[in-house]
Amino acid sequence: MKKFIKNIWAKHKLMLALIFVLSACIITLYRMVMYTYITVRFKEARPFHHHAPVFYKGHKVGKIVGVRHSKDYQHTLVKLVLYPHDLNLPENMTAKLKIIKRGRFEKDYIDLIYPENPNPIRLKNKSVIDGTTTIDAHSFFSSMDTENLEAMEKNASDTLANLESSTAGLNDLLSMANAIVEENRENINISAKNLALASSNTNRLTSRIDRTITQEKLQTVFDNVDEASTNVKSITQTFTGVSENLGGTTNAIGQSMPMLECALANATAVTANLKEITAGIKCTMRKPFGGLRILFGRSINK
């Protein structure tokens, strides 16, 4: 079998090499056209597997294909390849470097997070998104130095001591409250009985009020209120009519005032004339033969 394969390779190695190169070119071209290559920028990054998978909502959509530092060495740039050919995600997506545990083993993966306010611009080749990293408690404590661990241990001890002191104080307080209750148990019972008696009296008073106030009495009260409202409305309308009549009378008096003034002026003129005539007659009658003078039409002086 091996000899047969060697004979075929010896005779057709050029053709097989061409087929292999052509297949590689086709696969590379397909990936370049159909796949999407983006970059995740991490400000802080922990050690992770450089070929970790990429998930979106629990489904694998790609993997890491390259890791490098930025030119200023302030960020870690992780290059991802995303498999879906119809990828439709906003450009302001974020990524988190997480750890999944399977038994005793831990595996890194990148989880793509959909934003709350998606950008209308879609992810495309050479897009750059921001990334954050997570770390579990085991890795966190294992990476801490001795001084920090000692400080944390001291803080934990102080916290436990304070908790014990607080618990003891709480126990003393509960014991004191229990003693106070025991000392005043009789007074508490009397107060409870008085409260129950007051509640009973209130219930009896309420029942009496319920028996006194019947539906017929309430209906009578409401009818009286309606009738009083009707009477008030009628009185108001009467006052309105009286006010209108007073207004009409006032207008009539106002119109009659010029005529009264004219009549008073005429009466004043007539009185003046009568006064002059009387004065003239008296003056003529004092003269000799005054009567004859008046009889024969003698003029009368003022």
Image: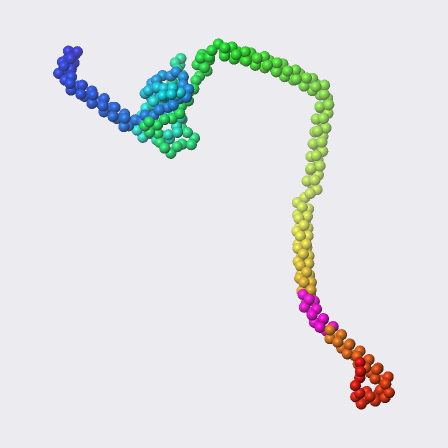
Q: What residue is drawn where x is 80% and y is 82%?
A: 301
147 is higher (above) or lower (below) than 116: above
Left or right: residue 147 compared with residue 84: right
Q: Quadrant of residue 83?
A: top left
The answer to whether residue 109 is visible is: no
| Place of residue 187 in the rendered image (x, y in percent of width and height, measured from the top left) | 73, 23
Left or right: residue 98 compared with residue 247: left
The answer to whether residue 124 is visible is: yes
Q: What residue is drawn where x is 37% and y is 30%?
A: 91
**Viewer-closest of 227 and 277:** 277
Q: Quadrant of residue 132?
A: top left
Q: Main secondary structure of the magenta part?
A: helix
**Viewer-closest of 2 and 148:** 148
149 is higher (above) or lower (below) than 96: above
**Viewer-closest of 145 and 229:** 145
Q: Tell me the quadrant of the picture where the N terminus can be found.
A: top left
Q: What residue is drawn where x is 76% and y is 74%?
A: 268
| Place of residue 258 in the rendered image (x, y in percent of width and height, measured from the top left) | 69, 70
| Place of residue 192 in the rendered image (x, y in percent of width and height, measured from the top left) | 70, 26
Q: Give yes or no for residue 189 being in the magenta stretch.
A: no
| Place of residue 26 in the rendered image (x, y in percent of width and height, measured from the top left) | 23, 24
**Viewer-closest of 205 and 271:** 271
267 is higher (above) or lower (below) than 298: above
Q: Quadrant of residue 163?
A: top right
What stretch of residues is rendered in magenta?
Answer: 251-264
Q: Tell me the quadrant of the picture where the C terminus can be found.
A: bottom right
- Report how many numbered discs are placed on residues in the image: 0
Q: What residue is drawn where x is 69% and y is 34%?
A: 203
Tell me how the rendering is colored. rainbow
